[in-house]
Amino acid sequence: MASLNVGSLGEYIREQRRHAQYSLRQLADAAGVSNPYLSQIERGLRKPSAEILQQIAKALRISAETLYVQAGILEEREEHGLGLRTAILADPLINERQKQALLAVYDTFLKENDVQPHTARPGAGDTDPNEPQTLEEYAQKGRISDGDR
Amino acid sequence: MASLNVGSLGEYIREQRRHAQYSLRQLADAAGVSNPYLSQIERGLRKPSAEILQQIAKALRISAETLYVQAGILEEREEHGLGLRTAILADPLINERQKQALLAVYDTFLKENDVQPHTARPGAGDTDPNEPQTLEEYAQKGRISDGDR
DNA sequence: CCGCCCTGCTTGCAATTGCAAGCAGGCTGC
DNA sequence: GCAGCCTGCTTGCAATTGCAAGCAGGGCGG
């Protein structure tokens, strides 16, 4: 069960702390955690919660993302292979409703292509020759007006 | 101390689970967590550890990153405007016409949100006062563009 | 009516997190 | 020598996580 690699995470944190010229207590203070706990984290005896990780990352001025990758929580730069669905949900430029609209369109396309939404093997990937519905109808779905931004 | 927004995280997970047509137990199984615990997470009664979050994200086939953003653990990344675009083009499950359609809809959403589609900076007040095109015309664009092939 | 399977929720309980308090040792100045 | 102030580490202990077991209720077929 690919559990977190707590060891290398701790080493990494310690390394970054030294690099930033912090003492253990200083970083613990800056991160808002107790110094004994930070010590245990660095030696890999404890696996810190997401919250603590985030605070440590902030105090070290490094991206929390990097820490998560080190901890084995986030895949390295993953993305782009897993699916459009993920990318849609992750996009910060459009709001929730718009995401849902895009997903709805996407799902419909998948259905047209006879692809199951999740299990989803691409199979041949050949293009369906007939376009059963017009794009306008799809677009309408996303047209739910919103006044934000 | 801006602690994690467990409530919205739970709602978000539940929403995504429903969207994927999973029952609570199914997702719990797929994620390798117990069903009562997942229930508590969705209702915001517990804040899951980083490890559990990761497993849930995997089971839902959404990026762990998205979940962390929802949980308030990770800041959102800016660079995704280009990312979704690329992801659409890279998706093997839909054909060229469908990609163009999705892109057209996406662009329309960006325009609705007053986001410039990554080619130019908005500048000061050069936003065109007149609605340049309707969504339907954008849709047309996606349609006619299949001249290739 | 009864059994069976599904949905989600509630309840103890072991294991773990995270901390306050205290310990060992290395410097510096007096 | 011995204060005083660093460094990091060890030790109980409250609070929390995460789970096995069990509960309520909705369909559905016999």
Image (cartoon, coloured by chain):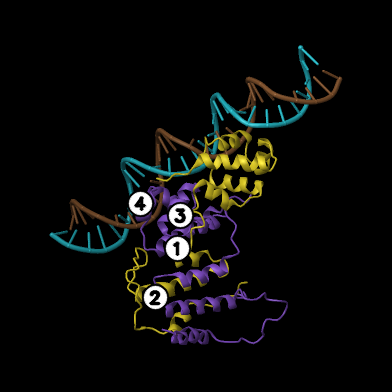
Chain colours: A yellow, B purple, C brown, D cyan
Name which of mark 3 and mark 4 comes first in the sequence: 4
Chain holding disc 4: B
User: Would you say the residues marked 3 and 1 are in contact, meaning their CB atoms lie under 8 Å apart?
Assistant: no
Q: Amino acid at mark 2?
A: Phe
Tag 1 and tag 4 share a subunit: no
Residue B93 picture location, percent across and down: 39, 71
Of discs 2 and 1, which sits in the foreground?
Answer: 1
Residue B1 in the image, given as x and y percentages of width and height = 64, 48
Mark 3 touches mark 4? (CB < 8 Å)? no
Q: In this image, A59 relative to A65: left or right?
A: right
- State the residue position of label 4: B29
| Side of C10 relative to B84 (left or right) | left
- Element marked by disc 4: helix
Label 2: state its secondary structure.
Answer: helix
Residues beneath discs 3 and 1 located on the same chain: no
Residue where numbered disc 2 is placed: A109
Q: Give x and y (percent) for residue B30.
A: 36, 53
Q: Chain of mark 1?
A: A
Chain holding disc 2? A
Give the residue pinned by disc 1. A81
Camera-nearest label, 3 or 4: 4
Q: Is residue A32 above or below residue B89?
A: above
Which disc is residue B42 wearing? 3
Q: Is residue A40 above or below residue B31?
A: above
Assign a secondary structure to mark 1: loop
For the residue carrying disc 1, how many other residues have a C-alpha within 10 Å: few (<14), some (14-19), or many (20+)?
Answer: few
Q: Provide the secondary structure element on which disc 3 rests.
A: helix
Q: CA distance from mark 3 to mark 4?
A: 15 Å
Amino acid type at image mark 1: Gly
Q: Please name the amino acid that badge 3 sits on.
A: Glu
